[in-house]
Amino acid sequence: MQKYFQFRELGTSYRQEFLGGLTTFLAMAYILVINPLTLSLSSIKDLPDAMRMDQGSVFVATAIASAVGSIIMGLLAKYPLALAPGMGLNAFFAYSVVLGSHIPWQHALGAVLISGVFFFLLTLTGLREKIINAIPVQLKHAVGAGIGLFITFLGLQNAKIIVNNDATLVGLGDLTNGDTLLAIFGIFITVILMTRNIKGAVFYGMIITAIVGMIFGLIDVPHKVVDKVPSVSPTFGAVFSSFGDSSFWSTSMIGVVLTFLFVDFFDNAGTLVAVANQAGLMKDNKLPNAGKALVSDSIATMVGAVLGTSTTTSFVESTSGVAAGARTGFASLVTAAFFILALFFFPLLSVVTAPVTAPALIIVGVLMVSSLRHIEWDKFEIAVPAFLTMIAMPLSYSIATGIAIGFIFYPITMIVKGRIKEIHPIMYFFFVIFLLYFIFLK
């Protein structure tokens, strides 16, 4: 095992890798709670049951998809990089596709599976790198920041800090409400932990908030801590039922598939580079085994879709494990083992209500918006598409809409500015695709 993962060459040990893998798990364990609540649309009242995914089933799908993805990443690519259903992509799945467009969740899973298959084929053929290189880095950063704003908006809504206002669309909620006060407390605690660079700060913030909620009677105390693993049957294989439905093969689904594919593209690229840089794995400014890492991600996405969860992707929280000493894929195997162990702690999910998860969403949004510093705001032809990409996501309640608007305006502003030679031909393809997306959008 030590020889396979090159412990000696990378200056690591079993203890170091175990601690790194555990730290990564603690930093990203919140996804086990937030993903089931997000995909079940638990914060939305008065919805038909048919629109909600089963929380227990999604919990199991999340844990297994995370474990499978992390195992493949560890064994195949040998990176200390863990995978799980991605934040932002799960919000797009639930709030934009299912809730906003009234598309059945089975169809949304179908779009995830198709995007995973395309991702896999593009990776094998090498086209993925060409497409990534064709899209300007400014728009990549704008997409990341826009998703961060969207996630933060969701968190503020779930906490009822921001509520509906008939006169101004949105307004400040009742800050004396118990649940809202609990969420505000959670934000303060998580911010303090993050500022102090506590490993797993988001996870610990949720635990502390849940405990305080139980003490003050805002959250019911669970009757069990450990129980049998919930059934995955409500969502397992449901993706295949969508392919036989003629409504699945519609124009609107093209935008959904492209969004899943696009965001997964750049989530992975950015995370891979970030983790590899921090771990000192980059060689001559190139990423060894990059293809194997991307194959791991695409397989995990396909497995997750069959089980019943949104796109599975590389988690940037893996950098916390690297900071704790992880250098090899063995750390990813450790993280995977903890995800499997977590399957038996489903009863604890009942204490993690919307006020408990809201701080996590807000803080994750803060981290994602940090990419704004890489955008050249002093160049108007860049600032316009970047800004519209970013701001349209929370305001339209759709990540796809933000991407589409930005990709339409980019060629226009660049051509008018006289920078036509800097536009890759693939960007014209995206221009036409997204223009058609709006024309035929119902």
Image (tube, helix red, strand yellow):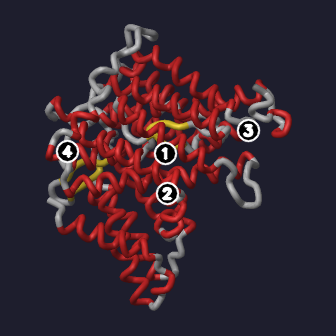
At a point 16% along the width and 35% down the height, the residue shown is 47
Disc sitting over residue 327 in the figure: 3
Residue at 81% x, 39% y is 10
Residue 393 image position (x, y, % from top left): 34, 59
Q: Amino acid at mark 4?
A: Ile
Of the residues under marks 2 and 3, which one precedes in the sequence? 3
Pointer 4 or 3: first along the chain: 4
Which comes before the other along the chain, label 2 or label 4? 4
Q: Amino acid at mark 2?
A: Val
In the rendered structure, are the residues bearing label 4 and label 3 in contact, judged by CB atoms less than 8 Å apart?
Answer: no
x 63%, y 32%: residue: 332
- Residue 196 visible, this orientation: no
Task: Tell me the residue that label 2 is attached to.
Answer: 369
Rendered image: mark on residue 103:
4
Q: Is residue 269 above or below residue 245?
A: below
Circles 2 and 3: CB atoms closer than 8 Å? no
Q: Is residue 319 left or right of residue 170?
A: right
Q: Nearer the viewer, residue 19 or 309?
A: 309
- Secondary structure at badge 1 equals helix
Is residue 252 depicted above or below 381 in this figure? above
Mark 4, Cα crowd under 10 Å, few <14 / some 14-19 / many 20+, is some
Query: Which mark lies nearer to you, 2 or 3?
Result: 3
Q: Say which residue label 1 marks.
A: 363
Numbered disc 4: secondary structure:
loop
Amino acid type assigned to the residue bearing label 3 in the image: Arg
The disc labelled 1 sits on which kind of residue? Ile
Residue 167 in view: yes
Name which residue lies at 64% across and 33% down. Answer: 75
Q: Earlier in the sequence, mark 1 or mark 2?
A: 1
In this rendering, the label closer to the viewer, 2 or 4 = 4
For the residues marked 1 and 4, what is the alpha-carbon distance in whole angstroms? Answer: 29 Å
Could you tell me which quadrant the C terminus lies in?
Answer: bottom left
